[in-house]
Amino acid sequence: MSNKDKIIEAFKKVKALKWVKSHRSNNTGIGKTFEDVIGVVENNLDEPDLFGFEIKSHRAESQSFVTLFTKKPSHPSRGANACLKNKFGTNYPNSQLKELHTSIFANRYNTYKDKYSFRLVHKTEERRVYIEVYTLADHKLLDNTVYYAYEDIEAALKNKLHNLFYVKAQQKQDSDKTELFFFDSAEIYTDPSLERFLKLLDKGKIMYDIRMGAYQSGKKIGKPHDHGSGFRIRETDFKELYANHETID
């Protein structure tokens, strides 16, 4: 039996369970629940979850962006997003510690706190994607020291996302307000490419989220805290990233 057949068989066993109580409250509950049920140990390793497939889950009605991968920038090699936070972030209430949460695209400048603009700048001759910061009023460049090299983006696509199993779930609440999921369909995507990724980036269909904060208490107080900075895409655009697609009902 091939790995694809194995994961399809495992999914159908989960589907046969019908409604399953969420194993975790908040937005991460759906992914945690599916991985627990299908027998995947939660991990942060840069390798696929099960039978060579990366598993992602979402609510059927959701139109939000889905995380492709979280990976630190290629340069500077240490603390790149923390440096941007320290330079351009805003203070937490009643604190000197800073945070920086903003969504960045390649096809337009964003607006951050009525002061700065961020934009992804794709430079093909350098084989890099820069996170550039500008003044809001006249888009004068303030910083372009942080970038992703092509080879690091491609490695993330090939190592983590080469085979993607994307699960959809219906959602409801029971009488005590506990969330339940019915994992009723899935999509299999295989063979993404750097070329497709960059085309989607240029079209504004892939965004980069910076979600940097700082620990405000405890032993790590003041140290940077990355809440999941990374590249994200809408489900409807997955087909443009991958060469192959198959629906599993």
Image: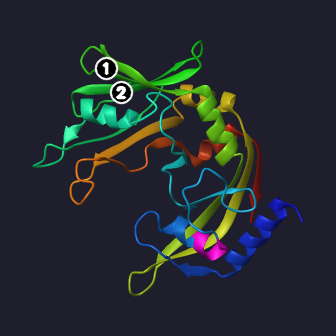
Query: Which is more toward the observer, 173 or 67?
Result: 67
Left or right? Give the position of 126 relative to 179.
Answer: right
Q: Position of residue 157 (x, y in %)?
A: 65, 40
Seen at 76% across and 65% down, the residue is 7
* Helix, strand or loop under label 1: strand
| 188 w.r.t. 158: above or below | below
Question: Which quarter of the rendering shows the C terminus?
Answer: bottom right
| Residue 103 seen from this side | yes
Image coords of residue 35 (percent x, y):
60, 69
Q: Is residue 198 left or right of residue 88?
A: right
> Under tag 2, what secondary structure?
strand
Which class describes the residues within 10 Å of circle 2: few (<14), some (14-19), or many (20+)?
many
Residue 97 lies, in percent from the top left, at 19, 44
Outermost right residue: 1
Q: Where are the magenta residues, as a range?
A: 34-39
Q: Is residue 200 left or right of residue 116?
A: right
Q: Which residue is mark 1?
A: 134
Residue at position x 56%, y 70% in the image: 170
Main SS class of the magenta portion in the image = helix
Quadrant position of residue 212: top left
Q: Residue at x 81, y 60 (%)?
A: 4
The quadrant of the image that shows the N terminus is: bottom right
Identify the residue under disc 2: 118
Q: Nearer the viewer, residue 207 or 156?
A: 156
Inter-mark Cα distance, 1 to 2: 6 Å
State if disc 2 and disc 1 touch (CB < 8 Å): yes
Q: How is the image coloured?
A: rainbow
Magenta span contains residue 36: yes
